[in-house]
Amino acid sequence: MSAAMLSGDDLENALRQIGEERYHHRHPFHHLMRDGKLNRGQVQAWALNRYYYQARIPAKDAYLVARLPTPALRREWRRRIIDHDGESEDTGGIARWLRLTDGLGLDREYVISTKGLLPATRFAVDAYVNFVRDRSLLEAVASCLTEMFSPEIIAERVEGLLKNYDFISRDTLAYFTPRLTQAPTDVAFALAYVKEHADTPEKQALVFDTLRFKCDVLWAQLDALYFAYVEPGLTPPGAFVPGRTAQ
């Protein structure tokens, strides 16, 4: 027996329920960072690994833009690439993230090289980029719906980092300020697209599976950080080692 077709509001409510259950605001690593229970090296490891996710977002969006059928849709989605790549050198989200890693004392060339990544970080992020490249356009757009939940986690993260770590300043966290307005704008478009184009129960089920997948991508990255740098603290060969790797 097939599932019933949901209204737009019911679809959104079901998506928000998935986020409440599976988004990485529930992950123990996020809680440790928010509550000031990580050391400087562990925060460095988070920022270094998260850089790869930030740096690959424009590639993911470029794959999506290439598949959009109208100039209006391409203009809307192209803005996301500009938000991350910037209009010129030292502008945009990636540049702001590098100012974060600079502020944490990491060598910029080492961060950009991605030599110190955890293998699971690379696998998870690449899986996300490949998902957007290879799956249906509806699924590609729906994969961005984790942005529905990002303002809350950003607010928690920024407050906790500023309160609990004397080696972090508001300038260091400049990446996050624009995201508090960019993310709601981005998600409003993506959510409207999904509500319009998920026009069968089967397509709505695909959207739910996509959001679960994207939550898994984000969760897996924090799993890897927890395993390598918290408990049991088994850092894989070649990955960043606080205090010993190029910083």
Image: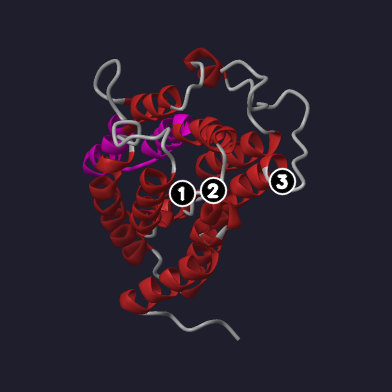
In the picture shown, does residue 34 fall above or below 10?
above
Bounds of the magenta segment: 55-83
**Residue contact at pointers 2 and 1, CB within 8 angstroms:** yes
Specify the label residue 140 is tagged with.
1
Question: Hey, what amino acid is under mark 1?
Answer: Ala
**Residue contact at pointers 1 and 3, CB within 8 angstroms:** no
**What kind of element bears circle 1?**
helix
Residue hosting label 2 = 135
Q: CA distance from mark 2 to mark 1?
A: 6 Å
In the picture shown, does residue 13 fall above or below 196?
below
**What kind of element bears circle 3?**
helix
Q: CA distance from mark 3 to mark 2?
A: 30 Å
In the picture shown, does residue 246 fall above or below 38?
above
Q: Nearer the viewer, residue 138 or 185?
A: 185
Q: Is residue 151 left or right of residue 101?
A: left
Specify the label residue 227 is tagged with.
3
Q: Residue at x 37, y 71 (%)?
A: 12
Tell me which corner region of the image, top left, top right, bottom left or bottom right, holds residue 59. top left
Question: Hey, what amino acid is under mark 3?
Answer: Phe
